[in-house]
Image: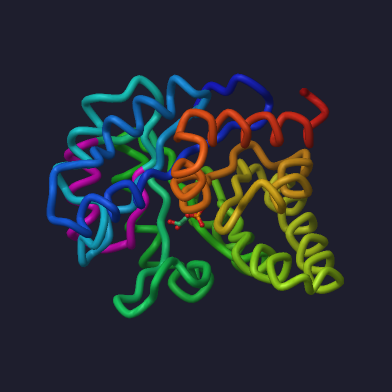
Amino acid sequence: MQGRGSLRLGVNIDHVATVRNARGAVWPDPLRAAILAETAGADGITAHLREDRRHIRDSDMEALRAGIGIPLNFESAATEEMAAIVLRLKPHAVCLVPERREERTTEGGLDVAGDEARLTSYIAPLRNAGCRVSMFIGHDPRQIEASARIGAAVVELHTGHYSDLHAESRLDEAEAELSALRRGAALAASLGLEVHAGHGLTYENVAPVAAMPEVMELNIGHFLVGEAIFRGLGGAIEEMRRRMDAARGEA
Ligand code: PXP
């Protein structure tokens, strides 16, 4: 993905589809949101096609693949059904995440170390199709090392726990979690992995993550779609970009 600063912003538009689906209507349209996000400074669009299709649908992925001018990051569980869709659409990137039906959002990282053989063969055809394969994992060194061994190009470090601690004002614990994320980012980069981060990021908590020099991309969704209610999607994204660039010393 080509960025405007050194840190790219991937905008996750899943929850535009959540609002649409709440009424069984055809709007708001995720593709329109993605095009607007691009204009506002997003470097890529992320969408998660869940097994239960609770927000993004197959037709949304097809429309995004055909309709946006910036890279599409296709988030999915590592299932055969999803591999077939990915191989047909050939998005720029695929981010593999754990998925449980009863969860509200992606709650933990992928257990790459515990599923190494299967994931190695799962990602091989995706890599051959030209997709950059990313593993959504915690900062556990075992998971980072396993991601490098299976041939992933990217790891996306899960910032959800840090975000929760920050929101609960448990600041010492949030700082400790940030330190672990920093160590994870440094380890991943030393193994040749590109480092991304995301989950639960907001205006209030984004700066220390954006400031990590190894982190090349942040993926942010729920907060931006919520903030769009107050300042419009374009304005919400512009403010996030401003804060990311400021944290990076590139304001
Ligand atoms: N990255 C990954 C891998 C995710 O699963 C999600 C949530 O769909 C995000 C980033 C974005 O998280 P949020 O919606 O909390 O910003």
39 above or below 215?
A: above
Magenta stretch contains residue 26: no
Magenta residues: mostly which secondary structure?
helix
Q: Name the residue located 55 percent from the left edge and 57 percent from the top edge.
A: 199
Tell me where residue 114 appears, x and y as whole percent: 49, 76
6 above or below 224?
A: above
Drawn side of residue 181 relative to residue 60, left or right? right
Considering depth in this image, is 197 or 116 the residue closer to the camera?
A: 197
Drawn side of residue 185 relative to residue 195, left or right? right
Drawn side of residue 9 relative to residue 84, left or right? right
Considering depth in this image, is 194 or 122 the residue closer to the camera?
A: 194
Residue 118 quadrant:
bottom left
**Residue extent of the magenta highlight:** 74-89
Tell me where residue 235 appears, x and y as whole percent: 53, 30
Considering depth in this image, is 178 or 232 the residue closer to the camera?
A: 232
**Residue that sits furthest to the bottom in the current view:** 102
Drawn side of residue 137 relative to residue 173, left or right? left
